[in-house]
Amino acid sequence: MAGYLKMGDRNYIGTLVSSSDGLENGVFVTMDYANGQVDVPADDATGLVGFVQNEIDFLNPHGKDETDFSINTDDYARVSVATEGKMYVTDKITSTYAGISVGDEMAVGANGQLALVADLTAIDLTGFHTTFIVKEKVTLYGNDAVIVVTKVK
């Protein structure tokens, strides 16, 4: 697992399917309700985003663990809509870890990974509907990770 919901409601959207193979836990996605799909953004995600936290839900999970689990096209995704105040832990980060500090503002960039706003293409903060404030730098399954709290504009 590359991430999980640390604090917030445990309500998930379970009616949307992945539009691509290899959708991993811990990434942020855009939601297309009209087509019933979620997908990682190809560029900066300036709209509403959701956080992927799938569970291994098949009968024989032998050889699978949460750190490398992903779903494929047309599999149902377990998505937590990033609403105000929810806290997430993720190691899906594109910015240089040493350059991230507590209190920094991050947003969702390409491939659904978090980046410091200054590192993104759309660096104008008014362009982002959802951003995240770094609360703590941590280690998740041996990887550098951040705990962030959602800020919705």
Image (spheres, rainbow, N blue to C red):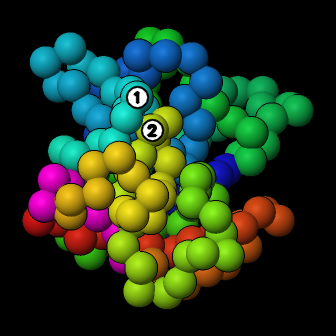
Which kind of residue does numbered mark 2 sit on? Ala
Kindly tell me whether residue 73 is visible in this rendering. yes
Residue at (41% x, 86% y) in the render: 103
Location of residue 59 by image quarter: top right
Q: Is residue 38 magenta?
A: no
- 69 up-or-down from 137: above or below: above
Neighbor class of circle 2 (other Cα within 10 Å; few <14, some 14-19, many 20+) is: some
Which kind of residue does numbered mark 1 sit on? Ala
Numbered-mark total: 2
Instruction: List x then y, in percent, for residue 117.
Output: 37, 63
- Front residue of 137/25: it is 137
Mark drawn on residue 110 = 2
Q: Earlier in the sequence, mark 1 or mark 2?
A: 1
CB under 8 Å between callouts 1 and 2? yes
Neighbor class of circle 1 (other Cα within 10 Å; few <14, some 14-19, many 20+) is: few
Instruction: List x then y, in percent, for residue 54.
Output: 53, 41
Q: Residue beneath label 1, please?
A: 42
Mark drawn on residue 89 = none
Kindly tell me whether residue 53 is visible in this rendering. no
- 77 up-or-down from 91: above or below: above
- Front residue of 124/92: it is 124
